[in-house]
């Protein structure tokens, strides 16, 4: 490898210094929000509410973790929410028709993955800017899902399947275990594998990455496919938790996922960020929304607050980058 | 190519084929398979229904020419439409309603421009954030309910005619004339070409690209306010999801109309033809009884194909 690549890859070596400090600040922020909410409301620190926050954060995290890899390559996937809806509706149908949750889970993962791969093809082969290609995909998927469902709702799934989203193991919700598993996989993949390092390199400097022999197109396809597959996984959790599938379940999921990635310190400009940061980002966002909920702020305020948080997070990131330069 | 975009307008003859062929093909297709499509009543219906989109797509063209994007337009239109409904309901005055809608739209547009120009936030994320904010404010001011009982003076805007021409079409024509004059016959227009083609040149010429950029986004928000009046008039109510996804139809119209996403040149007449193409597509699919969901999906495919072709042309 050339020197350029090593430099491009350097975010990994600085994980314990720069990135760790960034994540540490964000954990402090999360704790601060917890402290404020604990003072403001008695019900915040109840076990039920804390488990609820963790479960909610894990749902956002599943979508946001795949998205993190996309953003690390300086791309964006706006289709994740619509992907969740389509995957959930397809999986719901399969479970109803075959009675097999396993086939349903496979359907969701494959459907989500194919959608992600198509995004990757648009970005690489057709060279359409990612935010507009995936925005087009959003509406294609929305249209397909509404057409497929035709206003129907699929509900009532086998008890075993519903355990995935609503069950407990040793007192913790099952999605929290899944969160820990995927947090570990995502962190190891991004920080400790060649492919992960190549993804950072592509985001930091695509030209250098290509010149140093990284198969940029294949890595980008992988990244979008992973993002789609994680949306498929998230759709399973939603499906089993809600015990029903409807065409509109993905509409309010994309903005929070993007917010989690950006709050978590992943830069829109690529090459900087961690999957663990995204987990903290999901936690912070969920705490804010949960806090509004406990303080009886109408849910109508959530998109407004999420939108402000997205802009704030990008702005802070840009300020930090300017300082660094 | 970049330098050329600054000094000369794009040659329309190079583009007429693209969007005109799409439009002719769509009209021929639906003329053949959709009963009643070619009737005068239906075609004038397509045109009247295209007026709201025209008012979004024209400013979207300018924004895209600056290599920007405004994803918040649909949500801002929803909010301005609600403002028109609420204020005109409270004051019984159409003009005050319009003023409220335009003010709110202009404020959002200015915020978009400020985020993009001054803070330097990439347009698609800045406007995604303001999309969420406008959506949230729409829910808050309407409490998620429709606003009904608005005065007749508002509703009549959509249904009345001027010298035999429906008022929405008159408004769209005036808007087009204004944008045409602005883009092709003022220095401001020349600067917009420069902003997308070569912002450095503007700086050397002693101009502030930032203020121009803010103005371009502010125009977009203002037009969303005017279009909000038409939307409220058309639906005879304010509805918290009235403009959902309209920004996407606007982007589709601009992309199909031949404005480049990468080269900073735009063609307003192409955008209008693109708006009509989107309108024909939706209307035709509707006539052959395909649900609106299929219309949404096909507009998505239209955008992806148009952008793919744009990418090929800009690399050629």
Image (spheres, coloured by chain):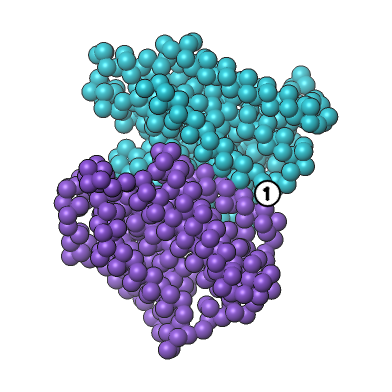
Q: Position of residue B167 (x, y in %)?
A: 46, 80
Horizontal relation, residue A212 to residue A261: left or right: left
- Counting labels gives 1
The structure residue drawn at horizontal position 58% and vertical position 25%, both measured from the top left corner, is A279
The structure residue drawn at horizontal position 45% and vertical position 29%, both measured from the top left corner, is A319
Horizontal relation, residue B315 to residue A11: left or right: left
Which quadrant holds the N terminus of chain A?
Answer: top left
Q: Colour of chain A?
A: cyan
Q: Position of residue B47 (x, y in %)?
A: 41, 75
Which quadrant holds the C terminus of chain A?
Answer: top left
Q: Against B25, is A317 above or below?
A: above
Horizontal relation, residue B126 to residue A290: left or right: left
* Residue located beneath label 1 in the image: A300
A35 or A241, nearer to the observer:
A35
| Chain assigned purple | B
Q: Against A208, is A292 above or below?
A: below
Q: Can you tell which quarter of the image residue A167 is in? A: top right
> Circle 1: is it few (<14), some (14-19), or many (20+) Cα within 10 Å?
some
Q: Can you tell which quarter of the image residue A70 is in? A: top left
Q: Is residue B4 visible?
A: yes
B134 or B48, nearer to the observer:
B134
Kindly state the secondary structure of the residue where label 1 is placed.
helix
Q: Against B136, is A13 above or below?
A: above
The structure residue drawn at horizontal position 70% and vertical position 46%, both measured from the top left corner, is A299
Q: Is residue A101 visible?
A: no
Q: Can you tell which quarter of the image residue A117 is in? A: top left
Horizontal relation, residue A300 to residue A253: left or right: right
Extreme residue in the bottom direction: B163
């Amino acid at each position: 490898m050339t020197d350029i690549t090593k430099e491009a890859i350097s975010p990994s070596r600085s994980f314990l210094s720069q990135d760790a400090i960034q994540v540490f600040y964000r954990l402090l922020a999360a704790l601060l929000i917890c402290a404020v909410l604990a003072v403001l409301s008695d019900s915040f620190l109840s076990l039920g509410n804390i488990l609820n926050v963790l479960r909610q954060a894990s749902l956002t995290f599943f979508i946001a973790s795949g998205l993190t890899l996309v953003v690390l390559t300086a791309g964006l996937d706006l289709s994740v929410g619509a992907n969740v809806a389509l995957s959930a509706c397809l999986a719901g149908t399969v479970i109803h028709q075959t009675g097999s949750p396993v086939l349903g889970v496979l359907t969701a993962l494959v459907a989500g993955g194919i959608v992600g791969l198509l995004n990757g093809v648009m970005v690489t082969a057709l060279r359409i800017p990612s935010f507009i290609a995936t925005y087009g995909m959003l509406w294609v998927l929305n249209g397909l899902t509404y057409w497929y469902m035709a206003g129907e709702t699929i509900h009532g799934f086998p008890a075993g399947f519903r355990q995935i989203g609503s069950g407990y193991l040793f007192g913790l919700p099952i999605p929290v275990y899944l969160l820990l598993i995927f947090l570990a996989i995502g962190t190891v993949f991004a920080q400790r594998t060649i492919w992960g390092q190549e993804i950072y390199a592509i985001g930091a400097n695509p030209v250098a990455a290509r010149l140093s022999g990284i198969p940029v197109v294949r890595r980008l396809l992988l990244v979008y496919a992973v993002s789609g597959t994680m949306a498929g996984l998230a759709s399973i959790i939603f499906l089993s938790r809600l015990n029903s599938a409807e065409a509109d379940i993905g509409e309010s999921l994309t903005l929070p996922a993007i917010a989690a990635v950006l709050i978590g310190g992943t830069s829109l400009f690529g090459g900087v960020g961690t999957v663990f940061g995204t987990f903290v980002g999901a936690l912070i966002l969920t705490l804010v929304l949960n806090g509004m909920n406990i303080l009886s702020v109408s849910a109508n305020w959530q998109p407004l607050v999420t939108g402000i948080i997205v802009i704030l997070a990008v702005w802070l990131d840009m300020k930090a980058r300017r300082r660094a330069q | 190519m970049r330098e050329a975009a600054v000094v000369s307008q794009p040659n329309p003859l190079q583009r007429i084929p693209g969007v005109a062929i799409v439009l002719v093909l769509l009209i021929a297709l639906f003329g053949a398979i959709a009963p009643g499509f070619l009737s005068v009543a239906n075609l004038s219906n397509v045109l009247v229904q295209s007026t709201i989109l025209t008012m979004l797509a024209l400013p979207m063209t300018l924004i895209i020419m600056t290599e920007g994007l405004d994803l918040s337009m649909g949500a801002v239109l929803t909010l301005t439409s609600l403002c028109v409904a609420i204020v005109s309901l409270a004051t019984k005055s159409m003009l005050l309603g319009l003023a409220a809608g335009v003010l709110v739209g202009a404020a959002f547009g200015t915020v978009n421009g400020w985020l993009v120009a001054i803070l330097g936030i990439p347009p698609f994320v800045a406007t995604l954030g303001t999309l969420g904010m406008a959506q949230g404010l729409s829910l808050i001011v309407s409490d998620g309910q429709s606003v009904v009982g608005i005065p007749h003076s508002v509703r009549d805007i959509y249904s009345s005619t001027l010298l035999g021409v429906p008022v929405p079409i008159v408004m769209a024509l005036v808007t087009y004339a204004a944008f045409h004059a602005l883009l092709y016959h003022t220095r401001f227009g020349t600067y917009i070409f420069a902003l997308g083609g070569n912002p450095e040149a503007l700086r050397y010429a002693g101009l502030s690209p930032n203020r121009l950029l803010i103005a371009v986004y502010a125009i977009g928000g203002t037009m969303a306010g005017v279009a909000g009046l038409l939307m409220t008039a058309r639906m005879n109510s304010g509805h918290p999801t009235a403009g959902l996804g309209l920004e996407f139809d606007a982007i589709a119209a601009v992309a199909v109309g031949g404005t480049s996403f990468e080269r900073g040149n735009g063609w307003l007449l192409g955008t209008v033809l693109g708006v009509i193409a989107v309108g024909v597509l939706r209307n035709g699919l509707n006539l052959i009884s395909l649900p609106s969901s299929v219309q949404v999906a096909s507009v998505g495919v239209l955008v992806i194909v148009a952008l793919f072709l744009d990418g090929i042309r800009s690399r050629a």
